[in-house]
Amino acid sequence: AQSVTQLDSQVPVFEEAPVELRCNYSSSVSVYLFWYVQYPNQGLQLLLKYLSGSTLVKGINGFEAEFNKSQTSFHLRKPSVHISDTAEYFCAVSANDYKLSFGAGTTVTVRA
Amino acid sequence: NAGVTQTPKFQVLKTGQSMTLQCAQDMNHNSMYWYRQDPGMGLRLIYYSASEGTTDKGEVPNGYNVSRLNKREFSLRLESAAPSQTSVYFCASRGTSAETQYFGPGTRLLVL
């Protein structure tokens, strides 16, 4: 079985500042890794995913994440955030059965 | 192309009442999933259906039943609602040999 730990439950950040959301996972098999975003009162939208290959993955809205196998991490970054990035962010992992295990989520609040 | 749709958007039940949450997808996906989202716990898998005619338990199946009515529709039934089932319920679908799950907008359920 896989598990995910999101190390920060809340991240306040000023507009145009960089942000990093930390995600560690545990698994005995190879995994796929995902970041989803949930805007207030909406469903989940895929930001980016790592399946194989290059460890630096670029997603929508200027987000990117880096897969680090030795540290079992998949941290999400954005160099300059906007007010509209205020949302909850979920890291998720699956093995090749495609069943997702989610972290508890990180709430990002962007302030002017 | 509506993607994944869920009805109702919001429901209030009294303890012991029953109800069915509906989910439909128009992407011709084989696999469908039901999750519940609770504060500080991320999303947890209740049931899933790998293909039409099959269903399997996820992490938290107790108190729920599901029906894969056809390839498009996957319903979740609460036979006797309990306050512990107050949650936001999300349906998702995934195409064959694809890794990404696509989520519906959610159903907010309050059990009094």
Image (spheres, coloured by chain):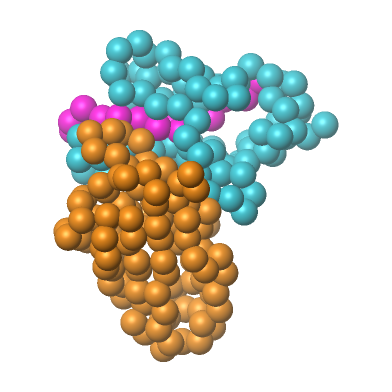
Chain colours: A cyan, B orange
- Residue B100 is at least partly visible in this image: yes
- Indicate the position of residue A36 as horizontal and vertical percent values: 48, 37
The residue at 41%/88% (across/down) is: B16
Quick one: B5 or A35, which is closer to the camera? Answer: B5
Locate residue A12: give its quadrant: top right
- Residue projecting furthest to the front: B1
Locate residue A79: give its quadrant: top right
Task: Give the vertical position of B63 relative to A11 (above or below).
Answer: below
Q: Is residue A32 magenta?
A: yes
Q: Is residue A6 left or right of residue A100?
A: right
Give the residues in magenta. Answer: A18-35
The residue at 27%/55% (across/down) is: B71
- Residue projecting furthest to the top: A54
Task: Give the vertical position of A64 relative to B81 (above or below).
Answer: above
- Residue projecting furthest to the right: A112
The residue at 24%/38% (across/down) is: B96
Q: Is residue A61 magenta?
A: no
- Indicate the position of residue B69 as horizontal and vertical percent values: 27, 65
Number of labels in the image equals: 0
Q: Quadrant of the C terminus of chain B?
A: bottom right
- Residue A102 is at least partly visible in this image: no
- Indicate the position of residue A15 as horizontal and vertical percent values: 76, 26
The residue at 48%/17% (across/down) is: A58
- Indicate the position of residue B81 as horizontal and vertical percent values: 41, 81
Q: Is most of the magenta stretch helix, strand or loop?
A: strand
